[in-house]
Amino acid sequence: MKIFQVSWVFVVLVFIGNILIMNKSQRIYLSSGDTGNDTEDKYIRVKLEQDTETLEFMSLKIGTTDVYQNFNADYGVLVGRVIANGGIGVENAKISIFIPVDDEDATDPEIYSVYPYKTPRDTNNDGKRYNLLPRVSEKDPETGQLHPKQAFGSFPIKEEVVANPPFLDAYKKYYKYTALTNKAGDYMIFGVPVGTQIVHMSCDITDIGEYSMNPASMVINLGYSESQFTDKNTRIKPSNDLDDLPHIETQEITVDIKPFWGDVENFEIGIVRQDFRIRATLTNTFTMFGTSFTDSADTMRGSEDSNDPRVREIRDFYMIFPNSHTESAPNDDYGLALANKRIGVIKETIYYYPPEISDDECNISTGSADPTEDMQVLDPSQYSVYTRNGDFVFIINCNRDRVVTDEFGNQIPVAYDNPNGVFTTFRGFVTLEYTVDEAPMTSRTHTDKDNESGSQVTGLRVKFKFPQHAPMNQSFNYVQTSTYNQTWRKQHMKFEAQKFYSFSKFHGCTANNVDEDANQWRPSPENWNGFFNRERYEEVSYRDNPNNSNDRHVDLNNAGRDGTFNIGPIGVGDYSGYNNAQYGMIPNCDISGSPRFGANWLNLCIYFPQTGYAINPIKKVNEVRTSSFLATQFKDNASANAYFITENTMPIAAGQINTKWFGRSDLHWTDILEIPLADIIAMKSYTTKKGFTDLQVGGLTLSNYRNGNSTPAPTEWKGTWSAECPLRGGRDNGNPTNSTKDPRYYFYKGFDTADCIEFLYDLGLVTE
């Protein structure tokens, strides 16, 4: 790393008349320091009003009552800003007036051992040059996070200074003129001896507040070699040579300090301003994370009845298979048990609006942007992906809403193509799936008993877009010109820099146990509402009895039913051998002592259910190919019924097509959530189970999460949610006929060995 040490030209800039007086305060307008010439410090002289009590400049203030103690000042005031990206103030940079060790202390072994610096380039016993960076990390009392996440400096912490006399002597003598930059990047050192001084700056770009960078973004955005990092680019490789560390910058500038005041005739004062520019180009990022799992390779809805191995009725598309533990010991819940699940590697596609598409154009209801043309797919080389045991983390660059820091220390917007500043937001949506290559499924072929026609039933795994939602029968559909399709595409998320986001999915289900196929069709398509008729629940106007996790009679014929998240007792009754309790999922309903989860939101975790579909025609079910769990099925319309189970040409966005296996948006509601850092810490501390509710982990920012009792406020990027849940979901005990809404919030940190919260800590994205 290059160390700057040059001679500086003294320039006097007089700004008489640029004075703002308000409430006995006087603002001094200093030049921005952004002249393009960093070989000049600035000595600013202004006329002082006699009744002034406070001097204001940049984002700083000085009270005048304590500064006029002598007729002429024998000291100066040094101010400045540490700047990145041509106009962004850098917080938490360390500034000092370098004081060489004197001859007396150079012969004192105790003093010299802690302060051996005759020049800023001299090194200590550890081989580290003069710097102001901390020797060890300390926990922030407000956030509970370690700062910095990795400490490479040599500056002692307060406890060492107080307890160690040599440290204390050196601190009082040689570090007496030090400062930290504030949120605007500004610093002030008051009382600096007049004359030529060496001003030092130390900066760790991983520890600069809201613009802090992480190792992954340093590799992708700054082009640093991966050889400088460890643990898959999540840690910086240690070195005692600060010049070898990619995140550390040190600079020295020689400055001529002039007296703060002393012109008694013109009542003028003078302030020296010296800015620093860091070499790195800062890039804002945000983090998305979550966890996931799916069914076993042999499990799906839509296979044979155990008594009649033929797919021949509509209800058979809703049946779980396998439905027994072993042939000799049948057990209806085997296919639903957590022990029958698996984890895999998630595949993401990230769609986004580029910065030239304005916020007004992105508005979901009134905007003119067309996602099919105006969105783009984020290239995988432009973000970082980490996966482990079903857990996943995406670290993504912001690319919208560029800002710079003004004279007052405020962030102000500038054009997206301005060469200065930094982006602060991102707009887009995400599609997630488990591919067949990563998690294969077993296909099954059956022939009917009369050998009249063969049928092949194979498995599909539902994919999801985040976010998505729609009222009943307003899902995206096979009619490409449908307005529902465009609404689905437009639903997206606005992400902000330095924040954490996770996923929430409503675990929808559709039950069907009716064997009279002809009675399940509504009189006309407009009355179908996307689901088959089921007379038993006609009083509540639902066809396939959607989102009923409470009905034991359709336990096996419940497509997508999340009773698979059973945590029944080990070795007791029907649950012997399942060992579900070890997975720690929290149920939201109980059926005759059998705990289940379904028809409600689950936060942090994505379950990818597997269901079956028939490839060949089956005469008795009028060309129905799958359950209504995936997509609407129509009478005698084979092409429509097969549309979402085969390759198709329906646009998604950004010129991408093919919505094969995407789950319908009026049942499978999904959302992206902002997760506060304090909530992540609270979730980490709860170790009793992987699953929990807000009753087990208190103090969470519940308004950020999804449950059956709270409808989020409308936004111009997601639109207006029509209810808390689709199709009367989210009711108490998983029963849609129950008027009481379930007020609890459900979370799951990960199936089996997965733990998405722990993964954030292991990657160093969150610390303690």
Image (cartoon, grey):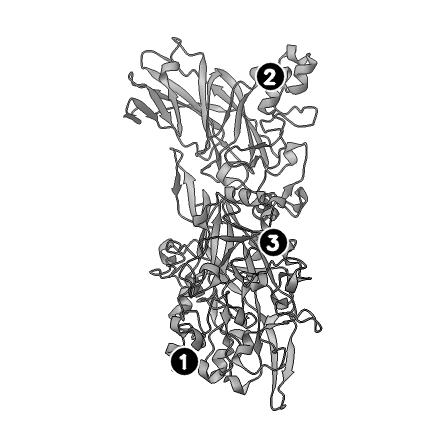
Residue mark closest to the camera, 3 vs 2: 3
List the single residue furthest toward the top: 71
Q: Secondary structure at mark 2?
A: helix
State the residue position of label 3. Answer: 584
Figure quadrant of the N terminus: top right
Residue 417 visible in the shown view: no
Q: Secondary structure at mark 3?
A: loop
Residue at 38%, 77% (x, y): give it: 527
Residue on which the image places disc 1: 522
Q: Which residue is mark 2?
A: 168
Residue 491 lies left or right of residue 245; in this view the side is left
300 vs 615: above or below = above
Q: Nearer the viewer, residue 322 or 156?
A: 322
**What amino acid is found at the position of numbered circle 1 in the picture?**
Arg
Give the CA separation, mark 3 to mark 1. Answer: 42 Å
Q: Is residue 8 above or below residue 761?
A: above
Q: Residue 47: x percent and y percent?
A: 32, 19
Question: Could you tell me which quadrant the C terminus lies in?
Answer: top right
Question: Which numbered disc, 3 or 2, marks the residue that appears first in the sequence?
Answer: 2
Residue 740 left/right relative to 591? left
